[in-house]
Image (cartoon, rainbow, N blue to C red):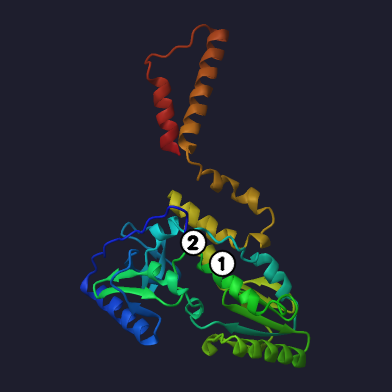
Amino acid sequence: MEEEAKPIRQFQRRLNPHLQEVVRAEVLKLLQAGIIYPISDSPWVSPTQVVPKKSGITVVQNEKGEKITTRLTSGWRVCIDYRKLNVVTRKDHFPLPFIDQVLERVSGHPFYCFLDGYSGYFQIEIDLADQEKTTFTCPFGTYAYRRMPFGLCNAPATFQRCMLSIFSDMVERIMEVFMDDITVYGGTFEECLVNLEAVLHRCIEKDLVLNWEKCHFMVRQGIVLGHIISEKGIEVDKAKVELIVKLPSPTTVKGVRQFLGHAGFYRRFIKGFSSLSKPLCELLAKDMLVTRLLVAWHILELFTSSWGSNSGDAYFPNRSSPRLAIQWLVGDN
C-alpha cells in the first residue's frame, strides 16, 4: 500500500432480485471451493458489481433503422469494484510481454500444443495479512478472498511474474507463456511431444492446474492472442476481419474510438495504417471543434482584410455574418 493510505469502507449496492440470485450462486460456489471466507471486522470493504458477459460483437439496427455495433451477452459476471483500493495500492510495474514479439517467436513451427490455465488468478494465494483488503460486501454478507481475484491493479503483473518464474528455463526455448495461455512448439512431432512432457511435468511440480477442455495437443496451427500461427507464419483471424468490414460508419466519438480499436488490432498487417487512420484520430482531439472554429474565424478575418485592401472596405450588411459562416461550418461537420 502507499504510505499514509487509510482503510476505505464502502457500502453495498442495490441489486434487483435476478442479479441477487446471480450473486448468491457465485458466493456459494466460491465458498464451497474455499476461495473466499466470511469476515466481519475488515476495515477495507469494496462493493459488488454485476456486469453482462460479453461473447463477441455483432451489427444490429436501432429504432431509427441505423446500423450500430453491439456486444452479445451470454450471461452475468460478478465483479468486485476495487477502484478505490487500487488508487492507494503501490503499483507493481512488472512488464507484460509484447504481443508482437511473442507471436514472432511462436510462429514458424510445424507442431504446437496449446495449454490453458484453469481459473488462473485463483491459483495464486494471497498473503494472510493482505486478505482482509480484498473484502467485498453483498446482500449475503461480507467476504474476503484467500486467492487472488480479478480487479486488483497488480493482479496481471503478479500472475505473469509467477508464470515466468515457473517456466523461466523453458520460455523462448520450447514454449511461450502470456498470462494463462501457454504455447509449446517443436520442429518435429517427437520433439514437440518431448517438450510437452517437460512442460506438463513442471505443471505437476508447481501444482499448476490446466483446463483440459481448452487445451489442444499436437496440432499444425492455432489461435494465439487473436492471431492464427502456423509453420507459414502469422495470419489474421478471418472471422475478426469480416466483423470489422461489416462495422457501420461511426457517428459518435465513442464509435470512432471503438472502430480504431478494432482496426488497430491488426495494424501490423496494414501498410501505412497511421496515415490511413490519421483523419479519424484527429476527430478524437479534445478541443478539435474549438480549434476548427478559431481557424475558420482567422480565415474570415484574412478574407475580409484582403477584400478591403483590394476593393475597398469589406461589406457585411449584418455584423453577424461571420458568426453565421461559422455556424454553417459547424453544421456542415
Q: Quadrant of the C terminus?
A: top left
Residue plotted at (60% across, 63% down): 94
* Label pair 2/1, CB-CB below 8 angstroms: no
282 w.r.t. 273: above or below: above
> Which image quadrant for residue 157?
bottom right
289 w.r.t. 121: above or below: above
Q: Position of residue 93 (x, y in %)?
A: 58, 60
Residue named by callout 1: 157
Residue plotted at (39% across, 63% down): 82
20 w.r.t. 247: above or below: below
Q: Nearer the viewer, residue 197 or 317?
A: 197
Q: How many marks?
A: 2
Q: Is residue 48 left or right of residue 105?
A: left
Near mark 1 (Cα within 10 A), the count class, few <14, some 14-19 or many ≥20, is: some
Residue named by callout 2: 247
Separation of marks 2 and 1 at Cα, in angstroms: 34 Å
Q: Is residue 54 left or right of residue 118?
A: left
Near mark 2 (Cα within 10 A), the count class, few <14, some 14-19 or many ≥20, is: some
